[in-house]
Amino acid sequence: MPLRDELLTPIPGTNPGGAELRYDPLYDKIKEARREDEDIPQGDWQVTRKTADWPQVIKLTKDALTTKSKDLQLAVWLSEALLRREGFAGFRGAIDMLVGLLEQHWAHLYPPIEDGDAEMRAGPLEWLGIKLELPVRRVALNRAGHGWLQYQEARTVPTEIDASGDQAKAETRQALVAEGKTTPEDLEKGFQSTPKAWFKTLVADIDGTLESLHNLDELSRERFGEAAPNYSRLRVALEEVQRTAKQLLKRRLELDPDPVDGAANESIAAVAVPDGVVLPGSIGAQLAPQPTSREDAANRIAAGAKFLRQSDPTNPASFLLLRGFRWGELRACGRNPDPRLLEAPTTQTRTQLKSLLLDAKWEALLETCEGVMAAPQGRGWLDLQRYALTACDELGSDYQFVGAALRGALRSLLTDLPALVDMTMMDDTPTANAETRAWLKGILEVEAAPAHEVAESIAAEVPRLRGGRSAALAEVRAGRTDRAIALLMREASTEKTRRGRFLVQTELASIMVDANHHAVAQPILEELIGYVEAHKLEEWETGDVVARPLALLYRCLERGDGDAGTRHALYLRICRLDPLQAIGFAQAGAAGGSHDDQT
């Protein structure tokens, strides 16, 4: 019997879902098998590092799911273990198993639905969408075991050739190598040792995993409704790994192309080549014929940009090519663009882009944006740039240089043509709606910082900024705190999920604390922390999200001369959940410790 069928077979007895095992000793056994000490330098305090026993996790969870309980928590732990042990092939099968559990065992699945609220049942799947992002980035992308994280790490290390002629680069390389960083030469050795078939299997497994995750996401929305878990972080991680894997396969195919059979060669040779069209690599290659009109030239620019985008999607060149052409048309009129050049997008285009944004389909959103940018409607519609840059930010570090280039180009355009923001297009709609205008203020106010650093700083300051939350941040930067609070209060009232409300209310409290409204922020934060404890969020939510309201409450108590023992207890929880947030309170935390010692 296939593994998936075995795991989905009903448990014998009166309840096909079996028994609830949450308080069974089996849970503790699995947790201990999963437990793994962080791999960090230990200095003089050398101890044996505890590593996870993934084969044991697989055995225990499989046995329990087959014979004892249809439990999503067990299934998610099995998914994690299969990802760690078998890579994307195992992970794809695990996600298919989760789909099967939701399809076939919804009525008797654990955790149970309490009082019609499916949020506790969604918790393990929410955990999967958050916690497995990092393990996905660690899966081997070559036979030497280098993962996506090491490919990113190696970008910071100068090559031996570069270092040989530059003292500063030589010192940088030496220091990074001493820290154990992966070098470009390490990656090259790993690539050379990996055959084409291995890369093909890898890409197929990642493609299949993304397809399975899409199925899980669709079914989760159907089953959980407003409480549906969010898989966006996991999906983005898979997509970034997918792009790197495809680039590796593409390079391997260039070095070791697939054979072309004789029939295919004959059919290619039989194709007539129109006059003026030059096949790649032709001897005596000619320049393409001159465009016959301005429209023809524009079409060729659009086609060329699309070709460059498809062949090298993270290269800024194709994006800047379109903007250089279309924004050049605006600049040709001086500082006051001709309003007749501001052609408006169709309602269908606006709806399509908005839908892609709401569905978090970032690659499709960016590609659609570039299609519009190539057309006359792309000249002055500034909402389009917000969509494109949002997609770049969501697509992660692979697109950070594209995002930086687009931000720089947009900033330059608005410096040259400041009136553009306040103009209307030919259908009398604004070039920038209210949300875009608030967003643009952030773009223009951070001119001194590289765009990717700005994106990172915003992400650190306000986790998971989206929509109204990013607009609220722009209002804060413009000195309009009251408007920012109003924006977030409105968003909190319309947020459909409890988790979404939790995040918005945390941002609301953060702005209040920064504005010295501590008395108003404190009861909001106490309510949020009560929610954390009631729903045991520390067990499945990311540490930074849970620690943030704790850190904000600490600041309130500190300002209000709150009880030192309470502050110290908060400090210890923050240290455990997110040490980075605790660093700022280290001195105060030490003082709180002294208080406890005295008592």
Image: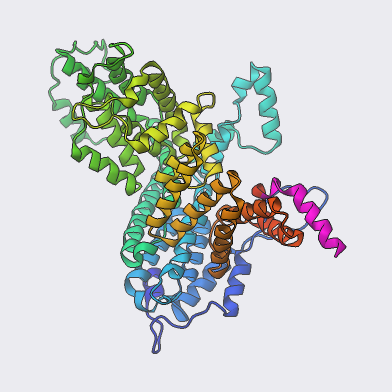
Magenta region's main secondary structure?
A: helix
Residue 276 appears in the picture as rendered:
yes
Q: Position of residue 401 (x, y in %)?
A: 46, 29
Q: Is residue 584 magenta?
A: yes
Q: What residue is drawn where x is 36% and y is 42%?
A: 362
Residue 295 pos. (x, y %): 17, 18
Q: Is residue 442 above or below residue 211?
A: above
599, 457: nearer the viewer: 599
Residue 389 at x, y percent in the picture: 39, 34
Q: Which quadrant: the C terminus?
A: bottom right
Q: Would residue 203 be counted in the magenta stretch?
A: no
Q: Quadrant of residue 177?
A: top right
Q: Nearer the viewer, residue 401 or 165?
A: 401
Q: Is residue 349 above or below residue 407?
A: below
Q: Residue at x 46, y 45 (%)?
A: 465
With 597 as the anchor, is 93 left or right in this view?
left
Q: Please give left or right for residue 559 compared with residue 383 in the image.
A: right
Residue that protrudes farthest toward the right in the picture: 598
**Part of the protein shown in magenta:** 582-599
Tell me the residue at 58%/49% (across/down).
517
Q: Where does the image place residue 448, in percent across and percent down from the top left?
A: 54, 23
Q: Decide which of 75, 419 is in the foreground and name it.
A: 419
